[in-house]
Image (spheres, rainbow, N blue to C red):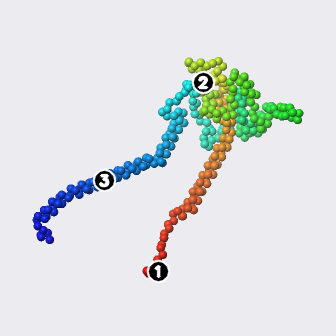
Amino acid sequence: MLSRFPSGALKQAASAAKKSSPSLVSSSRSASVRFASSSASSSSNAFESFMSSRLTLASATLFTAGTVAWYTHLYGTLPFIGEVHASHLSDEGLHPAAYPWPHNGFFDSFDHASIRRGYQVYREVCAACHSLDRIAWRNLVGVSHTADEARAMAEEVEYQDGPNDDGEMFQRPGKLADYMPAPYPNEEAARAGNAGALPPDLSLIVKARHGGSDYIFSLLTGYVDPPAGVEVREGMNYNPYFPGGALSMARVLFDGLVEYDDGTPATTSQMAKDVVTFLNWASEPEHDERKKTGIKAVILFSTLFVLSVYTKRYKWGPIKNRKIQYNPPTDKTGH
């Protein structure tokens, strides 16, 4: 068959093939370029959709807010924003150190021996000026004292009661239901006995002060001489942990001031630790029971969660994993 074609026709076909080959190459190149551009555009669109999705924006917002909150918790100030103070920063007092209190852990309770010693320090030292209005004698039972010990201490105090059958008030010995007596009958008497300063009630003092136990311990043990250039008015005492640096309360804890019943050395730091532990308990008497109840709740709900997961898998596993197959009926007539 090829022998029948003239030579001129073969030359024309070869030249036509040469002319069409560049167009095929260019078309293949353009197709590859279009494929590459389409893949790049699809990836960029996916990235843009990911960045503009609500989940991404919510995650970024939560991360930023959490970071700012953690920074503020650690350093007390917002990042990159200067604070504006009407007074000097030293007026806020020196920040106390963080001490390893034995009751700070999730599963730790109060040191009840320390609570008993702390009550002794409060009774012999602090009770001369500070009240403890929210604590009754019965609150000591089972915590630091027995019922007989608490009843004996209550009976040492005379309480006004009445009226009697004649309509007159009378004095009676204290009972377990009575609250601990205040050192002054009213606020005016308290100010008159402390050069105009009002001694605060200590029932919630740990919760009411920034720093809590660390602040009170540092305050009780932080009395020093004022540094050079700092003047303290007469009748005031310098303590760097107190806001302003000067307070009316003088140092009250000295080594050997109290003789503990259990023979513990009554150093200044030991007495401060014990009385702070007692005041911490006074501000939160339900502390130990709260943690005990929390542990029981965690164990109970963890067990119920495991049982619910097992029941869910046992009941719903076969239903969710079953395979449904439809077999259409066959035509038995043969049509």
Image mark for residue 245: 2
State the SS at label 1: loop
Rendered view: 166 above or below 322:
above
Query: Between disc 2 and disc 1, whose residue precedes?
Result: 2
Q: If the image is split into quadrants, where does the C terminus sit?
A: bottom left
Residue 145 makes an appearance in the image: no
Residue 51 position within the rendered picture, expressed as x and y whole percent measured from the top left: 43, 46
> Callout 2: few (<14), some (14-19), or many (20+) C-alpha neighbours within 10 Å?
many
- Outermost residue to the right: 166
| Residue linked to disc 1 | 332
Work out whether mark 1 precedes mark 3 in sequence or the reverse, and give the earlier one: 3
In the image, which disc is placed on residue 184?
none
Can you identify the residue that label 3 sits on?
A: 34
Which amino acid type is marked by label 1?
Lys
Question: Mark 1 to mark 3: distance in Å?
Answer: 56 Å
Disc with the residue nearer the chain's start (2 vs 3):
3
Q: Is residue 26 above or below residue 87?
A: below
61 to 78, vertically: above or below = below
Identity, as a three-letter code, of the amino acid under mark 3: Arg
- Residue 226: x and y in percent read 59, 20
Q: Is residue 42 above or below residue 7?
A: above
Q: Residue at x 71, y 27 (%)?
A: 129
Q: CA distance from mark 2 to mark 3?
A: 76 Å
